[in-house]
Amino acid sequence: MEIGANDIKEIVVISGKGGTGKTSIAASFGYLSGDDVIMADCDVDAADLHLLMKPDFAYSEDFYSGELAFIDSDKCTSCGECAEVCRFDAITLRNGSYAVDALNCEGCGYCTRICPASAISNIKQQVGRFYISSTRTGANMVHARLNIGADNSGKLVAKVKNETKRLAAAYGRKTIIVDGSPGVGCPVVSSLSGADLAVMVTEPTKAGLHDLKRIYELVQKFRIKAGCIINKYDLNPEISEQIRIFLRGNNIRELGAFPYDEKFTMAINQAKTIVEYDRSGLGRLIRACRETMHLMINEKQML
Amino acid sequence: MNIAIASGKGGTGKTTLSVNLAALFAEERKIVLADLDVEEPNSGLFLQGDPVSEGVRYKYIPEWEESTCTLCGECQKVCNFHAVIQLASQIMIFPELCHSCYTCSELCPTDSLPMIPQRMGMLKHSKDGMIDFVESRLDIGQEQAVPLIAQTIEYLGEHFGENTIKLFDSPPGTACPVIEVIKNADFVILVTEPTPFGFHDLKLAVETVKELKKPAAVVINRYGSGPADEIIEFCHTSDIAVLASIPNNRRIAELYSGGELIYTKVPEVRTELEKIKNHILKQWK
């Protein structure tokens, strides 16, 4: 059944700070939804969702983005103009001839355009691979792997998101769950773009609160509904209270609060989601959290 | 000597290790700690320094000079990042896509795209006893961390000698921000945790340092929270030393949560940090 793009709701799980439990929680939501959902791993440079979802990597495709300058040493007259115009120190003189340092080259093509001997060409870069899979929970999953040190992670994230939306429409899935990346830079911006709900996972630590405030500032720029999960809430009750004051002050709904519990880690160690590993304890809390989340996403008004 | 404290996975304890190690070094010598995780800088939450200097950091982007522009379209043609677009009667610039390569500006036949500074973040330098602390913070909405990281490393080079030990608290991942840090490091400490996530991302991080041909060692954090055999075996076959193992316990998590130093209150942590410190000093001599 083909469904309209407007019927598809996209939930992005983000955290600002790494290691707050984002991936474990996203995978749990995915598990609870069975095949009624499409998962997307947008943490393309340190992707971990596949370790819990066990995708089959059924379809894969190279991802090309950006370019790299290449100097043909036979044509190069060593005039040095390329090195002069390069703003990235990417062209250096080695044993009398100029060469491009791939790690520094941004692929702007300035050198290629001005080389008097036409010795430089720009080559399209394969910066990663992206995959469409079936997973052990029945959900389809779109994921990717950025090559080490590759630029353009934002573009690969955008590709993952677009493919996810296309699949959701084609298969008639109404919910997309996105495991976002840490930080506030380009991959996160791409993760949030077009989402219906941002689920911010935080922890009651000074760093957790600090990063929550920054990521919320970014979420606000996108005018997306936002909810928050406080993981390990009992680790530091004072900061948990500060988080709650921040949430109330900004009309952000608290979707759930989970206690500090080693079962979180134990579940990962058995490659299971928390809802499978600890059905009655943490699992119950996550199920409740998911229900609130779905109520929230279907509310018409912006909260 | 530049030492990067990095990890593929976020939340493994980079900042905890950076701050505590800096404080341990500072018991007997001067040390510079730089928070280069400019998207989410957190080291400063653990230090109480007196400000030394503070300044806005800029990147350069083109600005359209309508009066001299002939709408020849050269700028749009030469921009590989689609940051300059020509419309019917105007040139539009998308600063978030601009890589500050100057191509459009310098190849414009009428000099109608002068490069002007645009704010991307702040750099703060403070001093907490023997610790010089430098932190950069990317403005929300700015997407590119690399130019700010590069400027911060440049600042460190201008203000501190080659012989000063500089600790870089790095961004997570394996993409361009962390590469910018590691390529400027002499030695990399990779922090991991004994979970499948930690192990998986450690393998990526090791691949990264090997690609950049940097010497590296591993610190296992939350040791005991899961089986570490695979990690230790992997480090052994990759010829990478495991320098220390920081135990997993709630007390450490609580101290961290409140922004407190850990090694001064948990003796086992001091013992482990001493191992790292001695390894670094041995490298440095």
Image (spheres, coloured by chain):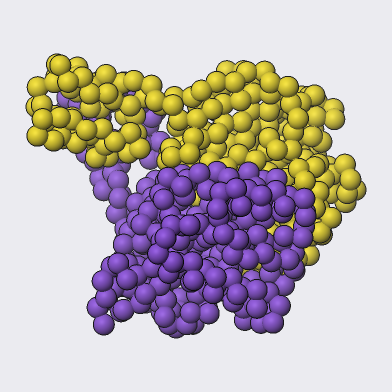
Which part of the image, by quadrant, shows the N terminus of chain A? bottom left
Q: Residue at x 77, y 50 (%)?
A: A238
Using the image as rendered, state which of residue A111 and residue B254 is in the foreground. Answer: B254
Using the image as rendered, state which of residue B277 and residue B30 is in the foreground. Answer: B30
Instruction: Provide the letter of the chain coloured yellow.
Output: B
Residue A18 x, y percent position in the rendering: 60, 53
Residue B49 x, y percent position in the rendering: 74, 26
Work out whether residue B172 can be spotted. Answer: no
Residue B38 x, y percent position in the rendering: 55, 37
Residue A286 x, y percent position in the rendering: 61, 73
Work out whether residue A5 can be spotted. Answer: yes
Q: How many marks?
A: 0
- Residue that extends furthest to the front in the rendered view of this protein: A301
Instruction: Provide the letter of the chain coloured purple.
Output: A
Q: Is residue A171 above or below residue A93?
A: below
Quadrant housing residue B44: top right
Q: Residue at x 27, y 19 (%)?
A: B114
Q: Is residue B116 left or right of residue A260?
A: left
Q: Is residue B50 left or right of residue B109?
A: right
Q: Is residue A83 above or below residue A169?
A: above
Q: Residue at x 58, y 45 (%)?
A: A213
